[in-house]
Image (spheres, rainbow, N blue to C red):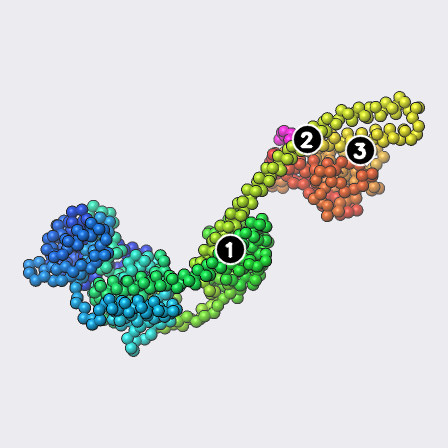
Amino acid sequence: MDPNRNKTIDKFHQLDLSTCEQEPIHLTQFVQDHGFLISIKCDDLQIAQVSVNIETQLNFKPSELISQKVTILECNGLEEVVQLGLRSQEFEQLNPTRVWMAKKGNSTKISFNLIIHRSDNLLILEFEPYEESDWSMPLTGLLNGTLLKLKSSQALNEMFEVMVQQIKRITQYDRVMLYRFAEDWHGEVVAEAKEAGMEPFKGLHYPASDIPIQARELYKKNLVRFVSNVNVNPSVIYPEVIPDKSTPTDLSLSVLRAVSPIHIEYLKNMGVSATLTISLLDGDNLWGLIACHHNSPKFLNYEFRNACKFLSQVFSLGLNTKREDDDTKKSINMQETGHLLFEKMAQSWDVVKGLTGDKPNISDLIDCCGVAIIIDDNQSILGETPSSAQIMKLVEWLQKNSKQDIFQTYKLSSLWQEAAEFNHVGAGILAIRINEKSREYIIWFRPEIITKVNWGGNPSKPVALSGNGEQKLSPRKSFQKWTEQIMGQADPWTRMEVKVATKLWEDINYILLQKSAEFRRLNAQLNRKNEELDAFSHTVSHDLRLPLTAIKSFGEILMVDHSQKLDEQMKLIVDRIIRSTDRMEVLIKNILSYSRISKGSMVLENIEIRKILDQAIEDLTLSDRTRNVRFSIGETPDLRGDQTMITQLFTNLLSNAHKYTRQEEEAEITINGKESSDKIEYQVRDNGIGIDLKYVDKIFEVFSRLHDDSFYEGSGIGLSIAKRIMDRHNGDIWVESEPGKFSCFYVSFPKTGSLK
Ligand code: ADP
């Protein structure tokens, strides 16, 4: 016996439940003691490893076998099957092979079932005792019978029953259960065949932690596992790691591989001595298990285990077809709705309108009680949802707690306590984040469904601390039925629903992308047109100036040099001509300066606003000495900008204030500036005629005038120039006003100064 054996078995038992989730079970180097394992190198068929129980089974010391040719075992039938397998690389189809071997020093050959598979460049040979079946009915007959029954089952439940009954007949375990995984990986026993007098487990639920994630992964690879006796210590493989390799041999597909000690403890706590577990797959996903329990040790021949594997595959196929029928109908409906929504979004160029318009709308896409579409602070609601304040808080929570674009839970309040307030309309949510940076979400809500669940033991205590003072975890001891009233949970979102939501997320992003490309294109087109227009108005204004000056001069010549030849009527007409040319000159000057503002180069410098204001006020006062306007100047912080433009800005604002207070007996204009951490803001306030706020956006457009032409002369360009100046300084301009009382224009500049 290998001297390391006891030491390594201790190591096997030292693995505790805290390591359960991380434990690399597939690398476990232990095999069950009812058989033995030999790994040989594919190229030279030399023995690389053996399980140490080969000593009790065949009288060979492990160390004397390592590096020997496998022929040393004098095993009849071995070499042929190895060569056959190596040639075809299809060992699965050759398993099991019946072989004969004698113990060392003994001549009587014993019969074994040899099961071979490949792991990297090793062949894993596993020898199990060959037991003649005492079963009266041939296996093929049983299988045929089962297939017929499965075929004629109408509903899924019927298929479940057939499976447990037939597997119990084939394997003769005391209890056979069909265990189905839920979305959260907890499981429920949905069918059971058991010996009379045993406590029923059907309808019981088991927490997800009972079958940890890496065990579930292995269940997908290795469809049948069995433990023949939980009370026999496993046998370690020697050497644990082959000298020229860095990791232990991968035994995922081994039939003898020992199961985790925690699982053994779990089974012992349940009072089970032997188990057989058969995986049930739905496509590539683990759908459930058939768990067979026996109260005493039990060995089951490979052929029988293989028959179970065959049935599990037939079941999986049947499951697929039956579920696919249902799913296909649902999926087609969902896809059609999704398609219609896509078309609506694309047609209206408005995602929200497209999703929330006439039926079918977004609430018809996925089964829910309500949907909310949140774009920044605006919410569009369909159906029953939490209040808008609760939705806003939920969005904040999602922003903080979910990094993914798709988030789903059917028990939100278990993650975020505050959500319990709206369990009746939002115990479950499925959310898609449209824009990572801003608050743009679509959230489907599902109401709470209160249910009773019977657990096989207290689900909140899937593990217990062992009592000897060591904080070591072990599986729970009690499997007493435990009834729980489940609150705060909605129907889980199905994989298909999440898929459909993901597709919608992709569609929305596609539409938004197209939209922004279209906007960019239109914008570029608009800019080009604007430039063309600017160039055009610049040329036209420029070219008009000359003939206009000529008209004016000729008018003046007529008035001055030939006035005695003109009657009063003619004089009036000539005077009109001269005044019209004056107005036209102003207009042309303004148009020119508007187009210059858009294109002209700028120089960023420090500007003393006080000087500009003093000059502008002086000019205004001189322009009309009949008026008595009170100008008050408050704070005048300097600012950084283009001197010419800023002068024009303040001149325009002040001359408007001057002009539109014309009717006031006591006209008053105040200018005040203030400085904050990042901005400099000025206001120009007058107590003139004011502006109807309905037109407030209009006044910054070219040629927009709100007041009577005959009384307030002007071109409607001054404020559009001011607006462009502010744009080019990356600043803002806006107005507050009350008709008949006051107007106050504000301009705000980035403190550091900025030009574009
Ligand atoms: P305008 O040459 O007509 O003054 P602006 O572009 O400077 O052109 O102003 C556009 C319109 O905004 C004006 O026609 C006027 O109706 C309104 N407006 C501008 N400033 C004031 C003000 N201080 N008080 C009242 N209305 C104003």
Instruction: Inspect this view and state whether residue 578 appears.
Output: yes
411 displayed left or right of 287? right
Instruction: Look at mark 3 in the image and give the residue it sits on.
Output: 621
Instruction: Provide residue 618's location: percent of width, then percent of height.
Output: 77, 32
Q: Quadrant of the N terminus?
A: bottom left
Residues rendered magenta in the picture: 599-606
Q: Earlier in the sequence, mark 2 or mark 3?
A: 2
Name the residue beneath numbered marker 1.
Answer: 338
Q: Position of residue 149 (x, y in %)?
A: 32, 69
Residue visible at 56% across and 51% down in the picture: 345
User: Residue beneath label 2, please?
Assistant: 536
Q: Residue lying at the far top in this picture: please name it.
A: 561
Front position among marks 1 and 2: 1
Q: Is residue 469 magenta?
A: no
Crowding near the residue tagged with mark 2, few <14, some 14–19, many ≥20 C-alpha atoms within 10 Å: few
**Eye-nearest disc, 2 or 3:** 2
Q: Amino acid at mark 3?
A: Thr
Local SS, label 1: helix
Report the front residue among 286 and 81: 81
Kind of residue at disc 1: Gly
